[in-house]
Image (cartoon, rainbow, N blue to C red):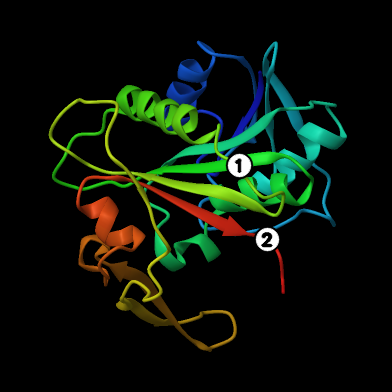
Amino acid sequence: MIFLITNDDGYDARGLQEFAAAMREVGDVHVVAPNSVRSCCSHSVTTAEELHLQQMAPQDWSVSGTPTDCVRVAVRWLGIRPDWVLSGVNEGGNLGVDIHYSGTVAGAREATLLGYRSMAISQYLRRDRERDWKLSGQRARYAFESLSPEMLDPATFWNINLPVVDNKDIALQLAHCDPEPDMLHFEYEHLERFTHPGHGHSLEKIIYRSNYQMRPRSDHRDVAKCFGGAITCTRLDVRLV
């Protein structure tokens, strides 16, 4: 089986590298990923600027673009014909309405639009717990192997979120669920106000603040299930009607 792996954290991200290593145990892996962090870029496409490609390994490339660009370049320029396009493992959850902002989810969505089966996989994080990316890669492979035999409508793809749990078990509970409709609360913190020395205009610096662990959650939806320790499995649809 041939796999194309991308992400929005960049080629060097541990989540991607450990996932690619895990998937190489079961198939032929090609990696085409951004050359820098592109988190929260959603479904951005580069059309007015040139893209730079760098070969990192015999079947690995980095691209000066978004995850969507990477999938397009892999298929239309590099000629990769994957059985599955896998986007992740992302550093941070992509739960609920996060799917609209996520570059990781967009990579899988673009693959579906191009006619390929796809899956986005993200690792929910907590500041008080250590990150084990090797374990995340193994759990991501377990999720893929569990879900890939299921029938997938040509217009749908999987969005998977891995939980934070105390044990090192790979085969965690799989919870099929819908996305949480209520968004994460956020605000902006004031950093600085100053006057531009050149033109005299007043300028302000602010920064985004939020607490992911405090986000709204409804029973039986992805946020509650993932926070409760399950691998959440959600089918997303690319159809507009």
Depth check: give the residue in front, 180 or 153: 153
Q: Is residue 139 above or below residue 231?
A: above
- Please give left or right for residue 230 compared with residue 67 in the image: left
Mark seen at residue 151: 1
Residue at horizontal 31 percent and vertical 60 percent from the top: 223
- Please give left or right for residue 58 compared with residue 14 in the image: right
Element carrying mark 2: loop
The residue where tag 2 is placed is: 238
Return the x and y of residue 111 as percentages of the image width and height: 71, 44
For disc 1, the neighbor class at 10 Å (few under 14, some 14 to 19, many from 20) is: few
Residue at horizontal 37 percent and vertical 74 percent from the top: 183
Which numbered disc, 2 or 1, marks the residue closer to the eye? 1
Q: Can I make out residue 41 in this image?
A: no
Q: Identify residue type, mark 2.
A: Val
Return the x and y of residue 73 as percentages of the image width and height: 79, 37
- Please give left or right for residue 52 compared with residue 207 in the image: right
Q: In the rendered structure, are the residues bearing label 2 and label 1 in contact, judged by CB atoms less than 8 Å apart? A: no
Return the x and y of residue 5 as percentages of the image width and height: 60, 30
For disc 2, the neighbor class at 10 Å (few under 14, some 14 to 19, many from 20) is: few
Q: Can I make out residue 88 in this image?
A: yes
Residue at horizontal 73 percent and vertical 27 percent from the top: 82
Depth check: give the residue in front, 78 or 108: 108
Q: Identify residue type, mark 1.
A: Met
How far, Cα to Cα, is label 2 from label 1? Answer: 16 Å
First in sequence, mark 2 or 1: give its number.
1
Quadrant assignment, res 236: bottom right
Q: Is residue 218 above or below residue 118?
A: below
Q: Quadrant of the C terminus?
A: bottom right
Depth check: give the residue in front, 199 or 180: 180
Return the x and y of residue 178 as percentages of the image width and height: 42, 62
